[in-house]
Amino acid sequence: MSNQTPYRTRRPLLRFSLPVAVLLFCCSALLAAQENAECLACHNDKSLTGSKKGKPIHVFVDEQKFGGSSHAKLACIDCHTDVAGKELPHNEELAPVDCGTCHAEEQALHAKSLHGKAIARGDVLAPHCKECHGTHEIYSAKDSRSSVSPLKVPYTCGKCHQEGSPVQKQRTIHQDNIIENFSESIHGEGLLRKGLVVAPNCATCHTAHSILPHTDPASSIARKNIAKTCTKCHAEIELVHRKVIKGELWEKQAHSLPACIDCHQPHKIRKVFYDQGMADRDCLRCHENKDIKAKNDGRSLFVNVDDLNHSRHAKTACSQCHSEVNASRVRACETIQHKVDCASCHAEVGQQYQKSTHGMLLAKGDANAPNCKECHGTHRVLGKADQTSSTFATNVPALCARCHREGKKAAVRYTGDQHEIIEHYTESIHGKGLMKSGLTVTAMCTNCHTAHSVLPRSDEASSVNPKNLPQTCGKCHNGIEQQFEKSIHSKLVNNTDKPLPVCNDCHSAHTIRRADENVFKLDIMTKCGRCHEEISKTYFDTYHGKVSQLGYTKTAKCYDCHGAHDILPVTDPRSHLSHENVVGTCQKCHSGANRKFAGYLTHATHHDPKKYPILFWVFWGMTGLLIGTFTVGGIHTLLWLPRALKMKRDKKNKSRVPEEEPSGEEDPEESHEDKP
């Protein structure tokens, strides 16, 4: 008889075990989330500090950035194991995190590498995992935010290996200017200047974790291994490489590659045997002629050599951009069918542009869609630091105005209140600072909308989308952003479903004024009232509000009492109107204010019987008394009016009766009465 459990017997077990497993998984996830919340309750405070070996250190953890990292699904105690099961608050001195718990293979390679051996001998300059990957903001190498993404690897390595760094100073075998030479090499130029993420970086040749000296036979840059390392990218080098160089056979033996570094220096690799100028000269034989024109549409094909020589592409051959040329033809360019693709060198920028509004319009074949050359030019492409460049800071508004000025091809698409954008910007505090004062550090179009990722405000990926706008403005107004993040208006603090105000709700988008201007001060109450409608009504019933409506700007406005960017509930001890701070807030205007003075009900209203019942009933009692008095007085007046009119008529008639003349006869009765 078989020892296996019969199928009918196993089925109830499966039915029972599957729900239990799911329940345990959910509970564990919930527990992790709960533990993380407990940790972040303290560590989400930017002012929180701890100590390490007696020295103070910042222990702030950005919850938002951690939530987007590769470790977002992990619990804090998965890495900080010595805190597991301990009561909070924990000890300040925690054991170092052991990344090898999860990344055992990488840890083993690192331990055998130059870096790992330096750590083992106690070298204080030796890099640990966190020096390269970060601590709580660890991203995948494919993520552009990662410090180990291809475009950022040279900068990460350069922190230690840059000329003059402590690591370079203590090297026994000194190699001059490693990072500097790499940045000028063909690899560095492709990676750092052209954004080619496929170009080699430090880790491509030296590996990421198994970094060994070239004298070690196991090293990826050892003499016997260097050709194998290089052919990971240059796979068909035997087919495309020149066979004879300087009169000598390049490959001494078939399929036995020489060491690449014999000809190409490790960090100074260039195209040492090819003259790019030759190809350019072939093109310029025709294109230097000012009369040369295209046959199909008659446009000029003239290339100003002086423009080309002074552009950012001065060292770039014509054929690198116009890649469809065929040198075997009399006219090499007659085989060109497509326009220049700038993304072939500027890959990252090209991806951003394709996803932007401009790129999507171009993909749809919209004739009004701007392409690279409309902003950067063709053969006279200059850097944004060049004052004559169209992308220099003070020139950007005029550049964008070519399409976005009122009546131009982009402006005709606008709806709602999106009109006269350029005109409003030039009169704003940003526009005046840039165009009238020449402050190149002030905000311009690309600072807010970006240069290549221009998206509509409704797109969640847009830099001017309400959820991203505080971070966009915070690039310049960093201190204000930090205040705003802690305020009741911030999504990080307020979990309401209602829309919360962001920068442009109070300051607008393109008509930004100085906050100390009278127009801004008088308008701010109306802007607050768009959300706080009932409260604004009560404000305008007060002395402060009534005087403000008369145009007096020195009286208290909303922000004078509640704050501008650091608005908090009254119950919060940090609030300007908390019990601890309210007297000081009043004293900003009323120097003699005391606790009794600060007890004044600023927003009290007789319209709210629940919140202010005494005021409600007193108001209506006095109002009723006033109405009653006037009503009784009015009725009395109406009732008295007929009699008053009658008395007036009688008096008038009486005045018309003539008086009787006196006679000589005496009244017998009067005579009788006069007698004694």
Image (spheres, grey):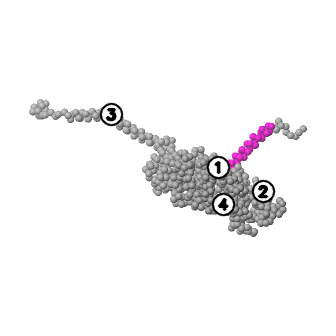
Q: Which mark is residue 639?
A: 3
* Amino acid of disc 2: Ala
Residue 243: x %, y % from top left: 79, 61
Of labels 2 and 1, the one closer to you = 2
What's the residue at 76%, 65% (across, down)?
263
How far apart are labels 1 and 3 at the CA level?
Answer: 83 Å
Q: Which is nearer the eye, 136 or 640?
A: 136
Circle nearer the N terminus (3, 4): 4
Q: Amino acid at mark 4?
A: Arg
Residue 506 in view in this figure: no
Q: Are marks 1 and 4 in contact (CB under 8 Å)?
A: no
Q: Which residue is mark 2?
A: 235
Front-most of residues 314 and 633: 314
- N-term mark: 2 or 1: 2
| Image quarter (top left, top right, bottom left or bottom right) of the C terminus | top left
N-term-proximal mark, 3 vs 2: 2
Distance from the alpha carbon under mark 3 to that under mark 2:
115 Å
Q: Secondary structure at mark 3?
A: helix
Question: Label 2, label 1: how many angstroms apart (C-alpha)?
Answer: 32 Å
Please report whichever mark, 1 or 4, sits nearer to the chain's N-terminal start: 4
Instruction: Please provide the residue range marked out in magenta.
Output: 11-40
Q: Which residue is mark 1?
A: 355
